[in-house]
Amino acid sequence: MNVISNSPWAAAGLDATSGRVLEHLVGVPSADAATVAEAAGISPREAEEALRRLEGALLVIRLDGRPVRWAASPPRASLGATLARRRAELAAAEGTLDRLQEAYEAMSGPRAAHLMEVLEHEEEVSARYTQLLKQSSVEVLHLAKPPYVTGTEVSSGDLGVEVGVQLRSVYETDGFTDAVSLETALRGTARGGELRLASWLPVKLVVFDRTAALLPVRGDRPEAGSLVVHSPALVEALAALFESLWAGATPVSLESRDDWPVPGGANGLGGADGSEGPGGPDVPRVDERTREILRLMATGLKDDSIARVLKVSRRTVQKHVTDAGNALGAKTRFQIALRAAGRGWLGPEHGAGD
């Protein structure tokens, strides 16, 4: 009988040598250790050890005589019992595995929450953003790009951020043409924040004190929810992403909020009684294109940059700026921006009341 090498005896709890010995014995009435050793290709000592192991497993029986002879037990009965014990052991092991998995899953929730939170609703995002902002004591880093969600695109100046917290924001230029983003930037820089523009941003992001970060689950659908990241390694990676984009962005100069006139205010461009500022009540209404140009000009962008953002010619930009200056009685770009803000031209069009 050929001895099968590398047979699957491990499943029955047998080593390869014992398996070869058993395979020989099931094919002969009986055999002594020397004959078994020769047939299995092992030493007499190895054969004796294997036979004792098989006897202990009730797979072979010892026969009287000199020399001692060995015979295999009926395989189905003897080996079947061994396999049944192995199945019971495997079932017990699987039960232990299940208990370990349950214990792991019971702990996975707190572990995951420690590293990351999932905010599914806009109200949750807004409330958590406000909380994280108020808790910040060193710096807040902000990447802003459309689409915006009104509930969360709010100014740090409105949320009681601590005095002395460094605010740095990078806005995507294509999204920096609406009144909401401009007003948000104005309020942020009024608290000593710094602002830059980039032609493209990969993600919306806020990093708080480099200990937590807020970003949307879906970049194209901010209403789909957000993630609050607490993992130190991930937060540091996101902060590094911000620093890389900040280094390549274009600095923008915005005057402090106190220098920006409020229609009807008492800061020189509108009387406390609500009278008109420079240009008088006969200043004509401004079209939306002029508004867009003036908003970008107020951020400090040059004509070429404004033309690229709005996809118009440089000559068109200059004509709108000149016409606005003539209408407002302003001679410099700075005066135009101030007086346009005083007239409310930097916000959305409200009709004849402009």
Image (cartoon, rainbow, N blue to C red):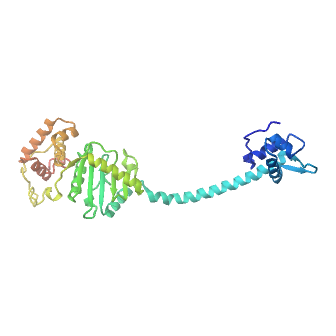
Q: Can residue 155 be seen in this view?
A: no
Q: Which of 274 and 335 is in front in this view?
A: 335
Horizontal side of residue 63 vs 135, given as left or right: right
Q: Is residue 332 visible?
A: yes
Q: Residue at x 62, y 58 (%)?
A: 99
Residue 193 image point, x, y percent: 23, 56
Is 85 above or below relative to 137?
above
Residue 266 image point, x, y percent: 10, 60
Please identify the quarter of the rendering in which residue 35 is found.
top right
Residue 129 image point, x, y percent: 34, 58
Q: Residue at x 23, y 54 (%)?
A: 194
Residue 192 image point, x, y percent: 21, 58
Q: Residue at x 12, y 52 (%)?
A: 338
Q: Which of 255 and 340 is in front in this view?
A: 255
Horizontal side of residue 251 vs 21, given as left or right: left
Quadrant (top left/top right/bottom left/bottom right) for the N terminus:
top right
Number of numbered discs overlaid on the protein picture: 0
**Furthest residue toward right:** 65
Please identify the quarter of the rendering in which residue 209 is found.
bottom left
Horizontal side of residue 118 vs 294, given as left or right: right
Q: Nearer the viewer, residue 1 or 278?
A: 1
